Image: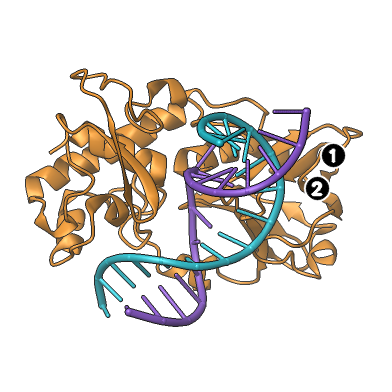
Chain colours: A orange, B cyan, C purple
DNA sequence: ATTCTACCCTGCAAGC
DNA sequence: TGCTTGCAGGGTAGAA
């Protein structure tokens, strides 16, 4: 589910409710997530104070201050969401984890498919292998067409899975890869190594544009995504190609096509994207 | 080294 | 109505 805009929307939504709060209770209803919930998570978290939330790629980073400082590394997988629940609000199916805060609010993790996870890190987060070899943030200065061009030379991989490779640039999943390629006018099947520097400049700009717009809209809600305050995202209405195969292109009217690239459905306009 | 496949898990829609 | 099948926002291990 969540790509970068959805994780960022979640971070912004829950931050005002959790930053500076102390964790008074931790309830684990389902420990079998993609990575098992650490056995000592409860004892580490109870009594800790939550610092300023950060995001790296699709990971949410929750710094913990107190006797045993550390960081929660939280990934929402395909179907995860975090929201603020009120004290006494009964958990629903797939509400796997609660962090009860000192003002009675609850940070509640919901994840039907359980592809997400919560892990606890001591020390520097940059030492974690999962974070260490991530590419640049797409909304940072380090990401541009020059990097895409340089990293793609010699590669025969289709440009869409190339763009979704977290070593190239982080946070771009199946929805926004398809949307950015549409905006840039690039055929998602084209070999990454055979795209010009000029076209990569346009692609980098398109990635920034689509992600920034999606964040503004609170992300994309396809089925059940909600931001930290329980609100769905409104970017779905802005999607040009994702999920629209068989429908007319908003730009030229041609019927949008569906292909599979890297085991992921990929919709594009055969007329606008070359 | 790069690229491709299978897999983790549940819910839902489509087809019969 | 009920069954089966396939697909879904991600990421990783292992094989080719």
Where in the figure is residue A41, as x and y percent of width and height?
78, 65
For label 1, the residue is A91
* Residue at screen point 23% across, 45% down: A188
In the rendered image, the vertical position of residue A47 relative to residue A234, given as above or below: below
Where in the figure is residue A157, as x and y percent of width and height?
23, 60
> Do the residues under discs 1 and 2 have CB atoms within 8 angstroms?
yes
Image quarter for residue A39? bottom right
Image quarter for residue A70? bottom right
Which one is in front, A8 or A221?
Answer: A221
- Residue A98 is labelled as 2
Report, in whole angstroms, how far the alpha carbon at label 1 lies from the one at label 2. 9 Å
Which one is in front, A237 or B14?
Answer: B14
In the rendered image, the vertical position of residue A61 relative to residue A219, given as above or below: below
On the same chain: label 1 and label 2?
Answer: yes
Q: Dot 2: within a 10 Å radius of its alpha carbon, few (fewer than 14), some, or many (20 or more) residues?
A: many
Q: Could you tell me how many numbered marks the image carries?
A: 2
Where in the figure is residue A14, as x and y percent of width and height?
66, 37
Which one is in front, A253 or A55?
Answer: A253
Which one is in front, A76 or A248?
Answer: A248
Q: Mark 2 or mark 1, which is nearer the start of the sequence?
A: 1
Q: Chain of mark 1?
A: A
Residue A5 appears left or right of A149: right
Q: Dot 1: within a 10 Å radius of its alpha carbon, few (fewer than 14), some, or many (20 or more) residues?
A: some
Residue A186 appears left or right of A19: left
Where in the figure is residue A173, as x and y percent of width and height?
41, 47
């Amino acid at each position: 589910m969540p790509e970068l805009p959805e994780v960022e929307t979640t971070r912004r939504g829950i931050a005002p409710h959790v930053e500076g709060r102390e964790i008074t209770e931790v309830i684990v209803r389902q420990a079998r997530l993609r990575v098992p919930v650490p056995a000592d998570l409860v004892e580490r978290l109870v009594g800790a104070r939550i610092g300023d939330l950060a995001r790296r790629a699709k990971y949410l980073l929750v710094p913990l201050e107190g006797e045993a400082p550390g960081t929660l590394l939280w990934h929402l997988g395909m179907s995860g969401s975090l929201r603020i629940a009120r004290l006494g609000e009964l958990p629903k199916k797939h509400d796997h984890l609660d962090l009860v805060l000192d003002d009675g609010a609850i940070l509640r993790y919901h994840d039907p498919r359980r592809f997400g996870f919560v892990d606890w890190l001591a020390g520097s987060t940059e030492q974690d292998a999962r974070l260490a070899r991530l590419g640049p943030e797409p909304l940072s200065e380090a990401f541009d067409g020059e990097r895409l061009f340089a990293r793609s030379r010699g590669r025969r991989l289709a440009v869409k899975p190339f763009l979704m490779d977290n070593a190239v640039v982080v946070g771009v999943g199946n929805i926004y890869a398809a949307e950015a390629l549409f905006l840039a006018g690039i055929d998602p099947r084209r070999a990454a190594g055979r795209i010009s520097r000029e076209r990569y400049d346009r692609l980098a700009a398109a990635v920034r544009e689509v992600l920034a717009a999606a964040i503004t809209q609170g992300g994309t809600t396809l089925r059940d995504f909600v931001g930290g305050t329980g609100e769905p995202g409104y970017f779905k209405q802005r999607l040009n190609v994702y999920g629209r195969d068989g429908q007319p292109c908003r730009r030229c009217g041609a019927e949008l096509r569906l292909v599979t690239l890297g085991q992921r459905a990929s919709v594009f306009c055969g007329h606008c994207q070359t």
